[in-house]
Amino acid sequence: MNKFNNRIAAQRQILQIVNRRQWGKEELLGLSRKAIERWVSVNQINPESRLVELITTASAKLFFLANKSQEQISEEYKMISRDIADISRKIEMEMG
């Protein structure tokens, strides 16, 4: 699987984990800063919660990978990819 597919798969996995829960008003529709802010606001989620912190961190790391997608796979890229997988597991644990 290429880097783009890995990144998209990671985003999809995080969204699926978060959206397993019924959020009352709206699912998390994306991992952009605006999408996360909207989801937090509409569902009245504490923006300083551990879950929001993890999602925001994953978002930032995915954004970094998106900007590096034209470069050769570096150790930094591999490390951040592993970080995202770890954050995904933490989100799953946070979700219960």
Image (spheres, rainbow, N blue to C red):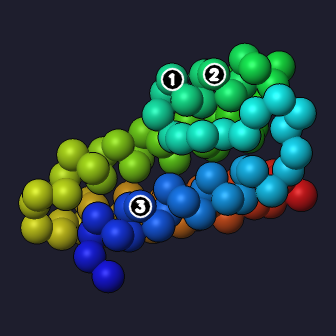
Q: Which mark is residue 34?
A: 1
Q: Quadrant of the C terminus?
A: bottom right
Separation of marks 1 and 3 at Cα, in angstroms: 18 Å
Which residue was labeled with disc 2? 38
Which residue was labeled with disc 3? 8
Mark 3: which secondary structure?
A: helix
User: Which amino acid type corresponds to the residue marked 2 in the rendered image?
Assistant: Arg
Q: Are marks 1 and 2 in contact (CB under 8 Å)?
A: yes
Q: Earlier in the sequence, mark 1 or mark 3?
A: 3
User: Which amino acid type corresponds to the residue marked 3 in the rendered image?
Assistant: Ile
Q: Earlier in the sequence, mark 2 or mark 3?
A: 3
93 in relation to 39, above or below: below
Q: Picture coordinates of residue 82 (x, y %)? A: 45, 67
Residue at position x 65%, y 35% in the image: 53
Q: Is residue 66 left or right of residue 18?
A: left
Q: Looking at the image, can residue 46 be seen?
A: no
Q: Are marks 2 and 3 in contact (CB under 8 Å)?
A: no
